[in-house]
């Protein structure tokens, strides 16, 4: 029995070894294929959840080496940053996780194959509910979702609750002390600019000389945007920069309702977005 335990341990360590990026021989290719299969973990994507617990096998195999931020990369090089939490030996993917639903149009859920390729990096394959592999959207350049890291400690946090709801990203209510609700127009969706009013919102949120802002969406992603103060024919603000990428990545459409929040200090460095509030 002891011999079998040693043999099993050696076999598992062999499979856990890093992937070979350039296998040359048939044997090297076979070993690489086996390591890919061993490193592939399946999780459910529930459209109502903003976080997911990784299989316990992943936590046992690679939980010690994964860091605070993981990157999920699909076949078209679209990338998703997600925040990692560790609780009672389990590994959770949290902030940023919900972005996959809009990007892949997962209306009734899906199955995700996550292939652990390196420290904090996963290959991503999406299957629908009947296990048909979905072709990832094509964007030029590929889409890259980056989570807002403001206020996130670099080390893992102790004593977090084992609750998907509580681990999921949500905006602080204080970020909507100043709020503006609007229905997206053709101009907002198709020109690369979001129109925001000066009266009642922009006049309290921004200094007129401000030219940039960070827009944090309701999945926890940060988008770097330009801010343009317009005086004709009436005073208003135009939010550009990565707004167009957000529209594409989150599949925003004409007629969709959104809420934009800010701090009423005339020095706001960030805007906060809730889609379909």
Image (cartoon, rainbow, N blue to C red):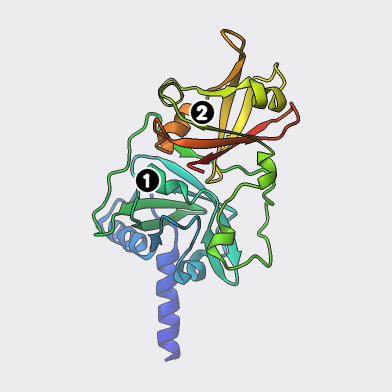
Q: Nearer the viewer, residue 228 or 225?
A: 228
Mark 2: few, some, or many residues within 10 Å (few <14, many ≥20)? some
- Circle number at residue 242: 2
Tag 2 secondary structure = loop
Q: Judge from the rendering whether residue 216 lies leftward or rightward of residue 206; answer left or right.
A: left
Query: Which residue is rendered at x = 36% and y = 57% of the image?
Result: 112
Please report the residue visible at 55 percent of the width from the left and 58 percent of the height from the top: 66
Front residue of 184/267: it is: 184
Image coords of residue 179 (percent x, y): 63, 35
Q: Earlier in the sequence, mark 2 or mark 1?
A: 1
Residue 74's label in the rendered image is 1
State the residue at coordinates (69%, 65%): 158
Q: Horizontal placement of 72 versus 264: left or right?
A: left
Residue 168 visible in the snapshot: yes
Rendered image quadrant of residue 229: top right
Q: Position of residue 231 (x, y in %)?
A: 62, 10
């Amino acid at each position: 029995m002891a011999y079998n335990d040693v043999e099993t341990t050696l076999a598992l360590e062999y499979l856990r070894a890093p992937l070979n990026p350039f296998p040359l021989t048939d044997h090297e290719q076979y070993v690489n294929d086996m390591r890919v299969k061993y490193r592939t973990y399946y999780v459910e994507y529930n459209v109502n959840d903003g976080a997911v617990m990784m299989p316990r096998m992943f936590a046992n195999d690679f939980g010690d080496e994964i860091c605070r931020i993981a990157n999920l990369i699909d076949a078209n090089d679209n990338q998703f940053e997600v925040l990692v939490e560790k609780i009672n030996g389990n590994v959770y993917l949290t902030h940023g996780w919900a972005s996959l639903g809009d990007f892949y149009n997962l209306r009734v859920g899906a199955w995700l194959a996550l292939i652990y390729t390196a420290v904090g990096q996963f290959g991503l394959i999406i299957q629908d509910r009947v296990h048909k592999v979905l072709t990832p959207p094509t964007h030029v350049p590929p889409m890259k979702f980056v989570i807002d890291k403001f206020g996130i400690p670099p080390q893992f946090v102790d004593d977090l609750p084992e609750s998907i709801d509580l681990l999921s990203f949500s905006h602080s209510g204080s970020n909507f002390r100043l709020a503006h609700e609007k229905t997206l127009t053709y101009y907002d969706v198709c020109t690369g600019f979001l129109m925001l009013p000066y009266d009642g919102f922009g006049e309290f949120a921004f200094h007129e000389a401000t030219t940039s802002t960070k827009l944090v969406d309701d999945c926890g992603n940060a988008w770097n945007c330009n801010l343009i103060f317009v005086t004709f024919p009436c005073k208003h603000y135009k939010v550009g920069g990565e707004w167009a990428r957000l529209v594409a990545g989150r599949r925003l459409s004409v007629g969709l309702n959104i809420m934009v929040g800010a701090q009423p200090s005339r020095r706001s460095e960030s805007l906060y977005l809730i889609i379909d509030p």
